Image (tube, rainbow, N blue to C red):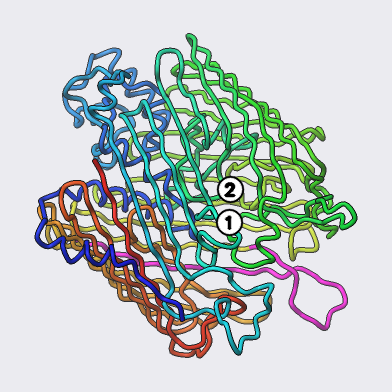
Amino acid sequence: MRFSLPILFVLLFVQAISFAQTIDNKDENLIEKKVETIAENTEEEIDYTMLVDQLTRYLQNPLNLNNASFEELDELSLLSDVQINNLLEHITRNGKLISVYELQSIDGFDLQTIRAITPYVNVSGDIDKPKFGLRDMFKYGKHDIFFRYQQNIEEQEGYAESDSTTSENSRFAGSPARLYMRYRFTYANHMSWGITAEKDQGEEFFKGSQKRGFDFYSGHFFLKNIGHMKALAVGDFQAQFGQGLTFWSGLAFGKTADGTSMKRNATGLKAYAGADENLFLRGVGTTWQFGKFQATGFFSHKNIDGSAILDTTRDEVTSVTSFLTSGLHRTPSELAKRKTLSETIYGGNLSFIQRRLRVGITAVHYVFGSNYQRTDELYNLYEFSGKQNTNVGIDYNYVFRNFNFFGEVSMSANGSVAHTNSLLLSVDPRLTFVAMYRSFPKKYQAVYANAISENSRILNEKATYFGFRAQILKSWNLMGYMDIFKFPWLRYQVNAPSKGYEYLAQLTFSPSKTLEAYFRIRRQMKEINTNDDELTIDYLDEYNTTNYRFNITYKVSPSIQLRSRVEHVTYERGNDGKEKGWLMYQDITYKALKSPVSLSFRYALFDTDTYNARLYAYENDVLYAFSIPAYYYKGSRTYLTLRYKIVRGIDVWLRYAVTFYNNRSIISSGTSEISGSTKSEIKAQIRFSF
């Protein structure tokens, strides 16, 4: 087993004891809570770096409500358009706010909403927005430098060098260390530039296929809100418009426990500083505003990974059968798929913007260097194929009193039209409803769409969604949603048109700032091919997954927080009987406002009949790293994340996580296989901020 921990992190950590200073931990507490709320229904690890960056920016530079624009308030993603409109009308009629708690006198604002936005906004001090200037930029700008080391301790099959059944074409060429480096400079909300580099586990580093060092590099230069120029992006950036039906690059969140928070908050152009190797554009883009009109244009060109078919006589790629998004380049077979396809995207958006009304037109054209042709399974019949495509869409957002109408209609080059339309109604501060209807024809083709959907791609779906949030008593809140969908055409492992539904209901009790408890039920039904091997013709079976969760969080003191959770799941497929699983854990978090030390500890027990009955739980991690592991089979898991603030501007994180399986002698399979019943991981990170 190859295992090495950089001595630098150990020395800095030991030396830290003599240099501790008092630093406020409030920012990290709030960020972790927000990310967990969004990520708790996500059954995969996603790079939430851009979300953390956005929250950090507003925590460090709170938005002044007395001079904020509709777009700035919308970008917070904490208020509905009805609330924003009511706030702006209140300020216009009555003058500037004196206190944040004056919001209680505005329709649509309750105490819970006010507490949620308070860390990110203010109403006092100099209400003039920061001006862009070189002198102030260098005086008040902020530099952040991160270095991270991460590694699984037990040897995986892909690294085995002797007595291994793994073929040479599947063996990892590099070390098991995962390395991450990031530098970023920011000045208020005006400027950002930086570089991010990452090497995944198993990839080579300064040798072999990676003689340049890291496998992935990303750099950006971004200006915002300078005169009529609303944005200028050079290098890596993201572009997001409307409700994501025509074009949306970057992360977008799906359904959450708050059934009313399913609206996309498009930000137009934004800087990209994440480590995901796919969710970005590479080129140049700019946005200008003149009066009530805002125009955006962008151009991107980069190479992406794909499964290619080669013309051996000319040694060139003739077509690509699939896009690959893992970003892993560890083995000869994975390296053969690296950057096999060129991708050129250009387009823009023209919007008319008023306080109550926004209408936008988006047009995007993309061209691939080789023909894209998915495999010839019948469910792929209407999928995009060829070298180029165009999408044109119109999005709208209109606020009338307590009604908010929003949606988007889009057409692909083949003439297929998709649409999504929604209504949000705020009856009063204690009751909000939302309804959505979406229709994505089987022939609709939009490679870079990311609207609210049950499918992983935006096609072959019709659905009706209802969500609500209600305060039923002073300390009791009820929220949830119901989503009913059908798929008119075939899908992977579904050889006929199918249907399904999903609902979630959550009852929360929060009598004080120190105690919060909730009970949640979530059920999902879909259809899938039967697994009866004796049948010559497949028919569809229903499979149902039902989760019951009880979660309680108690703040023992300003420094210590306890969280306990019990969750049970049942999985049923056809007549196969129920497969069950449960998870329970205890978290202890210590984050004193006047201590350089903070830590998060978890001990979890789990027992599931099969992998189908697995459960997911978000874990606290080092800053800009995210962990949502699956708990399955029988065993226990524990982790400890420790942070030490050495001096002002220098922070060190150490993390150790381990899973013990009671009924496994082999963990995972293929190149990830581990011989034994234990799987553990370490992380070490240091940040310099000045």
Give above or below for 224 relative to 623: above
On the question of residue 183 being in view, the answer is yes
The residue labelled by disc 2 is 278
The part of the chain drawn in magenta is: 526-554
| Rendered location of residue 98, percent (x, y) | 16, 22
Give above or below for 24 relative to 157: above
**Horizontal side, residue 85 vs residue 528: left or right:** left
Q: Nearer the viewer, residue 313 or 19?
A: 313
Q: Residues within 10 Å of mark 2 (few under 14, many from 20)?
A: some
Residue 636: name its quadrant: bottom left
Sequence-first tag of 2 and 1: 2
The amino acid type found where label 2 is placed reads Asn
User: How many numbered marks have been drawn onto this rendered protein structure?
Assistant: 2
Residue 187: name its quadrant: top left
Report if the CB atoms under discs 2 and 1 are less than 8 Å apart: yes
On the question of residue 90 being in view, the answer is no
The Cα–Cα distance between marks 2 and 1, rounded to whole angstroms, is 8 Å
The image quadrant where one finds the C terminus is top left
| Rendered location of residue 213, percent (x, y) | 50, 55
The amino acid type found where label 1 is placed reads Gly
The majority secondary structure of the magenta stretch comes to strand
Residue at image position (75%, 68%) is 540
Q: Residue furthest right?
A: 313
The residue labelled by disc 1 is 327
Residue at image position (26%, 32%) is 62
Q: Nearer the viewer, residue 496 or 249?
A: 249
